[in-house]
Amino acid sequence: MPKQKDLKRIVRSRMEKTGESYTAARLQLVRKKDVDYAKLAGMRDAPLQQRTGRNWAQWVKVLDDAGASSKPHREIAQYVSSLGTPDWWSQTVTVGYERIRGLREKGQRRGGGYEASKSRTFAVPVERLFRAFRKSLPANIKVKSTTPNKRMRLSWDDGTTVEIMFTRKADNKSSVAVTHQKLPDKAAAQKMKSLWGERLDALSEAVQ
């Protein structure tokens, strides 16, 4: 599988020859069997197969057969969920499929904006993790809504939005997944991804 920048070069070459749009030309190229779907989606096949019962190649076939490449994000996610996929994994499959089919870049939303995601698992009960996370927030960050031990929605100091999901994995094991939304560009997304990595590192020390 060519590297991402090589793939872009190949796509543009096809565009010149066929007159296709970037999305259409890329779609034709990534339908080839030698494409590394996992790399394009940003997640390995193993955890996807374990949690959803299908690998990326199988999901691509299922969603292509359903005409998903022409559907909005919400409809794709609803269809994936209707096949018995848990909510968080429905979003993972949908976003990965959109990346594979060139409907969004990594970190980009279908509407054109960008987002940064970061997650971490901790060896503590979810109640303790939830309390520690909220306590760690800067004073200038507004908590817009919460569902105790499950989710939190924040308004960041620059007007962007942060969605946080908490998951109980066992009595003394839980995870947090952060999605920082409405970022203006890829550079901002990368910056916030790094920042959330640092914040989760600090949280790891705080909950010990």
Image: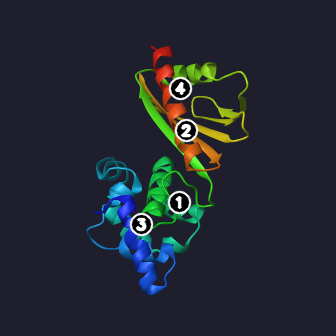
Q: Toward which corner of the image does residue 78 lie, by quadrant?
A: bottom right
Mark 4–mark 1 contact, CB under 8 Å?
A: no
Residue mark closest to the camera, 1 vs 3: 3
**Looking at the figure, which quarter contains the C terminus?**
top left
Name the amino acid type tagged 1.
Answer: Ala
Name the amino acid type tagged 3.
Answer: Lys
Other-residue count near label 3 (Cα within 10 Å), few / some / many at <14 / 14–19 / ≥20: some
Instruction: List the residue tagged with mark 2.
Output: 191
Of marks 1 and 3, which one's residue comes earlier in the chain?
A: 3
Mark 4–mark 3 contact, CB under 8 Å?
A: no
**Distance of mark 4 from mark 2, alpha carbons?**
12 Å
Residue 24 horizontal/vertical position (percent): 47, 77
Other-residue count near label 2 (Cα within 10 Å), few / some / many at <14 / 14–19 / ≥20: few
Mark 4–mark 2 contact, CB under 8 Å?
A: no
Q: Which mark is residue 199?
A: 4
Instruction: List the residue tagged with mark 3.
Output: 8
Residue 137 horizontal/vertical position (percent): 64, 23
Instruction: List the residue tagged with mark 1.
Output: 77
Name the amino acid type tagged 4.
Answer: Arg
Label 2 SS: helix
Q: Which color scheme is applied? A: rainbow
Looking at the image, which residue is at 45% across and 81% down?
16
Query: From the viewer's perspective, is residue 203 above or below residue 35?
Result: above
Mark 3–mark 2 contact, CB under 8 Å?
A: no
Of marks 4 and 2, which one's residue comes earlier in the chain?
A: 2
Residue 54 horizontal/vertical position (percent): 33, 58
Other-residue count near label 1 (Cα within 10 Å), few / some / many at <14 / 14–19 / ≥20: many
Of marks 4 and 3, which one's residue comes earlier in the chain?
A: 3
